[in-house]
Amino acid sequence: MTALLEVRDVSVVFDGFRALDGVNFTVDHGELRFLIGPNGAGKTTLIDIITGLTKPTTGTVSFDGSVINGKREHQRVRLGIGRTFQTSVVFEELTVLENLDLAASFRRPLVSLLARRKGVTEKVAQALETTQLTDLAGRKAGVLSHGQRQWLEIGMLIAQGPRLLLLDEPVAGMSADERARTGELLTEIAKDHTVIVIEHDMDFLRRYASTVTVLHEGKLLIEGSVDEVRADPRVQEVYLGR
Ligand code: ADP
């Protein structure tokens, strides 16, 4: 079967600086893949070329077997590529349910929204259930705890019905309990989605990651299980030995 995502020989050059240098990165359907690397390694740039925020200088990005280099960001959202950002995108004055409803509508042109109202509602219901936010559906987003807000953002992404979710440091700033719940949430989401997560927390990786991709100075350094990656001397030198 074709991989869901295939980044082939991609380089990104900003004003002569090579942020990505000949990266090959393949993610199969249903994977929960973790992406790590020191600051400036190129992780965000890799996510940006997948979502279409940045264009590769050379190389191709394929999604579900088709090259998507020419597709703009909103077209990629329609294809099923969704991301969260490090900065929050929730509307504080709206309730959890209203935020989810709004996110679900982003993907569709307004005219089809009413006609497909039932479909949207099902997506929202699924997002509420998966993130276990049903009890908080009527609460204003502005009063949520940090963890609950992060789950709402993941829920908003699910409500858009993506096939591939890209999450940027979803457990940053969370308590141990919140981290554990997020790990379980990611595992649950990966049952019927493909997920790529930028994350640094090694304890978290050890518990929830099957495959880890390590970037360093714009290059893919190694890919493997958490144990394989941790045992690699290059990784210890550039990343873990800080
Ligand atoms: P990471 O997410 O791993 O910390 P980034 O992908 O954000 O790394 O950045 C990789 C390198 O590319 C960094 O040195 C950063 O300064 C540089 N970079 C990222 N975006 C731009 C840009 N728009 N213009 C110039 N340099 C950039």
Image: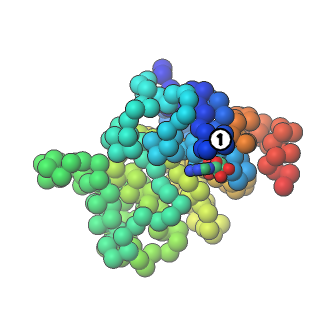
Q: Position of residue 66 (x, y in %)?
A: 41, 25
Q: Position of residue 222 (x, y in %)?
A: 73, 34
| Depth check, front residue: 132 or 213 | 213
Left or right: 211 in relation to 137? right
Left or right: 116 in relation to 10? left
Quadrant position of the C terminus in the picture: bottom right
205 relative to 30, above or below:
below
Q: Position of residue 97 (x, y in %)?
A: 31, 66
Q: What amino acid is found at the position of numbered circle 1 in the picture?
A: Gly
* Residue in the picture at 86% in, 45% down: 237
Left or right: 113 in relation to 186? left
| Depth check, front residue: 137 or 13 | 13
Return the residue at label 1.
Answer: 16
| Depth check, front residue: 8 or 56 | 56
| Depth check, front residue: 86 or 204 | 86
129 relative to 31, above or below:
below
* Residue in the picture at 21% in, 48% down: 109
Q: Position of residue 172 (x, y in %)?
A: 61, 63
* Residue in the picture at 66% in, 43% down: 17
Residue 125 seen in the figure: no
Q: Which residue lies most toward the top here? A: 1
